[in-house]
Amino acid sequence: VQPSLSSLAVACGSSILIYKNLKPFYKFTPPSLEINGDEAEAWRHVGAGHINAAQLHAVLVKLLHQLGGMELTTRSQAFLTSKEKDRESILQQCLNSKLVHQSTITCMTTMKRSCAELSAIDCIICATEYGYVYCIDTQAFTILTQCKIPGVPVFLYAAGLYEVDYRIFVSTRDSEIFSIKRDMKSVLDPIITMTADIIGMIRVGKQVNN
């Protein structure tokens, strides 16, 4: 975003809405995730009339046990949690839209790109329900880098400069804290595991407090 003109970024569902002068300017949506082949095939079959709502539910329940709920699309999750009497009507509504695997944005922060001055250009750091952490260019609105963690992020703290060196601390719903360094594409192990729920994260000096 132009350094001389402040902008506001608001996370809304699976998108980030950018406002300039409190007017809508841009909508950024992280890329869709890959859909499980068996799940996509089940929805194709029900759309073609080869299986009914009850059979679709049975297939999705099996996939739920095999893969876990986080690997299924939000459409399948909603269908699985619906009441039996409502499934047919929900099914008809779902068939009118394309099956996509998008993730809800759970938290955001910013990090300076190349200069620590207050008016310097920021990068947006956002995390999603499926454990992806994205660094976003606020001028071209493209993804600069991304990293995957095995948890659902709830708080982010970024330190450093994107083009120099940086570290992003991510706390999750499981009360674990992960550290992402430059050029990391995935992080498997937390640096801290808390025994109580994390309700906030701040930096004091060189320490990150929860």
Image (cartoon, rainbow, N blue to C red):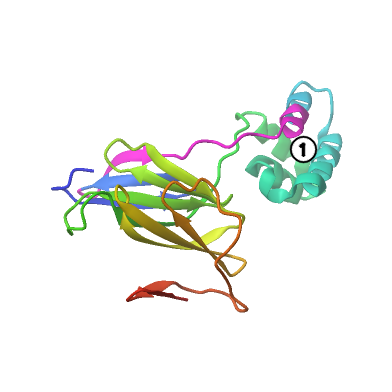
Task: Answer left or right for 31 relative to 48.
Answer: left
Q: Nearer the viewer, residue 113 or 26?
A: 113
Q: Name the one closer to the observer, 114 or 129.
A: 114
Which residue occupies the extreme left position in the image?
Answer: 4
Residue 118 sits above or below residue 63 on the image? below
Provide the secondary structure element on which disc 1 rests.
helix
Q: How many marks?
A: 1
User: Which residue is depicted at the point 67% across and 49% down?
Assistant: 70
Which region shows up in magenta? 21-42
On the question of residue 82 being in view, the answer is no
Position of residue 65 relative to residue 200, above or below, is above
Does the stretch in magenta take in 146?
A: no
Q: Quadrant of residue 110?
A: bottom left
Residue nearest the observer in this picture, 209 or 198: 209
Q: Quadrant of the N terminus?
A: top left
How far across and how far down the image is residue 112, in percent? 27, 54
Q: Is residue 34 left or right of residue 198?
A: right
- Which residue occupies the extreme top position in the image? 48
Residue at 75% across, 47% down: 80
x, y percent for residue 202: 39, 73
Instruction: Pinpoint residue 3: horizontal percent, then vertical percent.
Output: 17, 47
Q: Is residue 190 visible?
A: yes
Q: Is residue 95 left or right of residue 61?
A: left
Q: Considering only vertical position in the picture, is 184 above or below 207?
A: above
Task: Identify residue type, mark 1.
Answer: Glu
Decide: few, some or many residues near mark 1? Use Cα within 10 Å; few <14, some 14-19, many ≥20: some
Would you say residue 28 sits in the magenta stretch?
A: yes
Name the residue that disc number 1 marks: 88
Q: Position of residue 139 (x, y in %)?
A: 26, 39
